[in-house]
Amino acid sequence: MKLSRRGATALTVTDTDVEQDTAGIDFHKPAKGRPTPKRRDAQGRKGPVTAPKTRKEAYARQKQLTKEQRAAQKAGTAPTKARSAAEQRAALKRGDPDALPRRDQGKTRKLARDYVDSTRMLSNYMLLLFPLFILTTVVPQLRLLELAVIVIFLGLVGEWFIVGRRLRALALERFGEADGTNMGIGFYMGSRAYMPRKWRLPAPQVQRGDTF
């Protein structure tokens, strides 16, 4: 049977279209007429975590999870839980190194705090100068008292320098290094010494008169 050229062309185009239509079909997939696998069968191959069926099972799973988290934290592979405000203040009061602000960190600062908490200094009475200073500003006639307040304050600054130099030498002797200058350490000590003992943070860890 003869086909015209026009018919042959039409037949060739039709065959090409059929090939393109079937190119994207995966003949290895199951036929559409087959039943779709159930969800539990498909998930079973992925290994899902099943929910506990009883309260006892849930308690056992939670206990195991807590145990694993504690082991990870001890090994340092898990982040530490953030402290609450109360826990942070308690840690600061105890003097935990990871809770201390930058100005309170280091062996030299710890040595300075122990010195202040165990020794009586002139700076312990520094708060008494503030009402006297206010009084001299209100009453201009008290020039002599104002001069006395200024002299006492300069004496406290001298105490900071002397005690700071002593503590710096002690830190060098004990630790081989000292964090800060004579005046820097002395100012840190003075800013702690004038505070009432029960308000100091970190809280005093030595008694007055103790050697350290």
Image: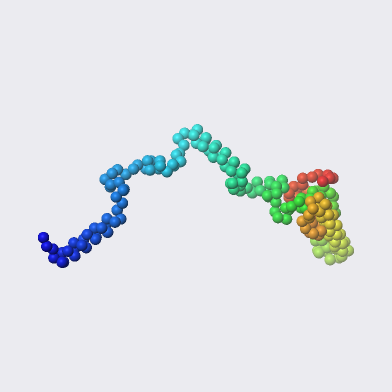
Q: Position of residue 100 (x, y in %)?
A: 70, 51
With 111 as the anchor, is 82 left or right in this view?
Answer: left
Near-viewer residue (135 or 115): 115
Which picture quadrant has residue 66? top right
Q: Position of residue 116 (x, y in %)?
A: 81, 50
Which picture quadrant has residue 123? bottom right
Near-viewer residue (187 or 170): 170
Residue 64 showing in the rendered view: yes
Q: Residue at x 59, y 43 (%)?
A: 72
Which picture quadrant has residue 130? bottom right
Near-viewer residue (86 or 40): 40
Q: Is residue 161 above or below residue 212?
A: below
Q: Residue at x 59, y 46 (%)?
A: 77
Q: Quadrant of the N terminus?
A: bottom left
Q: Residue at x 68, y 46 (%)?
A: 90
With 82 as the anchor, is 4 left or right in this view?
Answer: left
Q: Position of residue 36 (x, y in %)?
A: 32, 44
